């Protein structure tokens, strides 16, 4: 379903199916339908609407209370002291931030999963709010790395919102609209859209609740990487945990100067409000402290594509002993202008990270990582049962364990080359493991993942 929008402030509420957050679609509360239940449904189906402050304040507060209760009772706000002034200040901060990141749309598409996709004029996207990009236009496509085969990958129609046949017009980009309830799930308005500071790339000494199974290369100068990533919908034990599979392009000292560019898929109820696997990007120049963000939630990544919505749900996904689905991603540094470009599938450019965003990555990367990561909060007193990948160990192989295949890097002369020194590492192998290999069809590959809590991972 598509709606043409000519004035952002005059957009009307649209009726859609409620989003599934914390319970299955169709599940209802017991007892009679109350005012609280009505407002819960309203909260999760409505776009941003500007009502009088006192009414919006009541609705937002109720939505926050119900949301917290629905996710297994974590942080149940109904038992906390109510501070009207603080809540009103937070609400005003949220509304101001939403106005900054939700740009006027020329067309709006309602996705089957509950997302609202806004078609935003390319030159009006959030990236061009950056002082160094004001007045600029997106750059023309760069030269692809040599050795890149554009004919062996899937096309662009891999997201739920586009399966209806609706699309954004040329000259616009599809942007997943950020809702008030998305920001209410965040720890603060300032940290919304950013990884937690402890959410670092894998290093041998880290043990901060983030667990990895990765393949990596280091010891050279890297100008990009490519891989095909198997897509699954792993189950999470706790909605404040996540499970992801991605590539990391890394430079810096693994201290406060760490630079990363990241892309892949993730399941993150905290960020998106559901358990769909979603296509995502990320960047930082200071180890996730004050710079960078997910997707298009801050000024940084410049999107050039009118058919792919970053942050939108992926469809289809793989099934155990059934059909397998993967997405091919390429990140590389444009030799001419120095920007880092992202390509999906069969030659589809998504956009680029301007070179001026970075310090160490302004030149090249010193490490590339590929693989899976989960958060283990240990809230039940034992290891989480949150799955990585398919939720099955690497030894089960194809159609059962998740994989990365055709893993390559880009060298100094803009050539895609196979890896000669891929290392694999699992920091909790009884919970999530990894096994690598090489063959003619898949080149460098590995299987990885696991169920989390089991007899050997209590």
Image (cartoon, rainbow, N blue to C red):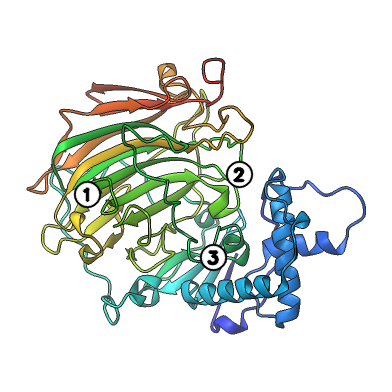
Q: Secondary structure at mark 2?
A: loop
Residue 44 location, x and y as percent? 68, 61
* Residue drawn where x is 54% and y is 42% of the image: 241
Quadrant of the drawing holding the N terminus: bottom right
Q: What distance separates the C-alpha of mark 1 from that of mark 3? A: 32 Å
Q: Residue 261: x percent and y percent? A: 30, 52
Q: What residue is rendered at 44% in x and 59% in y?
A: 309
Say which quarter of the image contains residue 294.
bottom left
Give the labeled residue for mark 2: 239
* Most distant residue in the left direction: 413
**Residue 252: assigned label:** 1
Q: Earlier in the sequence, mark 2 or mark 3?
A: 3
SS label for mark 1: loop
Binning the other alpha carbons within 10 Å of mark 1 as few (below 14), some (14 to 19) or many (20 upward) gives: some
Residue displayed at 49% across by 78% down: 104
Give residue 107's position: percent from left, percent from top: 51, 73
Say above or below: 402 vs 54: above
Who comes first in sequence, dot 2 or dot 1? Answer: 2
Q: Classify mark 3: residues with Cα within 10 Å, few (<14), some (14-19) or many (20+).
A: many
Q: Which mark is residue 178?
A: 3
Along the horizontal axis of the image, is 162 left or right of 214?
right
């Amino acid at each position: 379903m598509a709606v043409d929008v000519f004035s952002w402030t005059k957009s009307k509420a649209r009726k859609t199916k409620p989003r599934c957050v914390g319970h299955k679609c169709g599940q209802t509360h017991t007892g009679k339908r109350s005012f609280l239940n009505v407002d819960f449904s309203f909260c999760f189906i409505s776009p941003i609407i500007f009502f009088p402050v006192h009414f919006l304040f009541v609705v937002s507060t109720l939505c926050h209370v119900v949301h917290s209760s629905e996710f297994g009772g974590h942080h149940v706000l109904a038992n906390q002291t109510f501070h009207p002034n603080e809540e009103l200040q937070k609400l005003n901060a949220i509304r101001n931030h939403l106005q900054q990141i939700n740009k006027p749309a020329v067309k709006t598409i309602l996705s089957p999963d509950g997302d609202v996709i806004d078609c935003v004029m390319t030159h009006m996207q959030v990236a061009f709010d950056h002082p160094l990009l004001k007045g600029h236009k997106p750059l023309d496509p760069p030269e692809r790395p040599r050795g890149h085969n554009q004919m062996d990958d899937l096309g662009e129609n891999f997201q739920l919102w586009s399966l209806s046949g609706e699309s954004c017009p040329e000259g616009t980009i599809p942007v997943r609209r950020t809702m008030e309830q998305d920001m209410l799930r965040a720890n603060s308005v300032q940290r919304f859209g950013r990884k937690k500071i402890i959410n670092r790339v894998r290093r041998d000494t880290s043990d901060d609740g983030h667990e990895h199974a990765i393949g990596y290369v280091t010891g050279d100068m890297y100008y990009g990487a490519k891989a095909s990533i198997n897509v699954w919908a792993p189950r999470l034990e706790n909605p404040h945990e996540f499970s992801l599979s991605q590539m990391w392009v890394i430079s810096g000292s693994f201290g406060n100067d760490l630079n990363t560019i990241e892309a892949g898929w993730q399941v993150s109820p905290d960020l998106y409000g559901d358990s769909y696997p979603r296509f995502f990007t990320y960047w930082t120049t200071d180890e996730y402290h004050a710079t960078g963000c997910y997707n298009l939630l801050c000024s940084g990544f410049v999107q050039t594509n009118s058919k792919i919505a970053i942050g939108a749900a992926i469809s289809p996904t793989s099934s155990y002993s059934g059909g397998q689905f993967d997405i091919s991603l390429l990140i590389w540094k444009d030799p001419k202008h120095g920007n880092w470009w992202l390509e999906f599938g069969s030659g589809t450019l998504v956009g680029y990270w301007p070179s001026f965003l970075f310090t160490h990555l302004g030149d090249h990367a010193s490490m590339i990582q590929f693989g899976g990561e989960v958060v283990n909060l240990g809230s039940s007193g034992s290891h989480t049962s949150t799955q990585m990948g398919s939720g099955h160990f690497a030894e089960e192989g194809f159609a059962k364990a998740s994989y990365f295949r055709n893993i390559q890097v880009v060298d100094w002369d803009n050539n895609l080359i196979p890896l000669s020194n891929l290392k694999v590492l699992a920091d909790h192998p009884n919970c999530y493991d990894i096994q690598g290999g090489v063959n003619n069809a898949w080149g460098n590959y590995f299987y990885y993942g696991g169920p989390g809590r089991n007899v050997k991972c209590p």
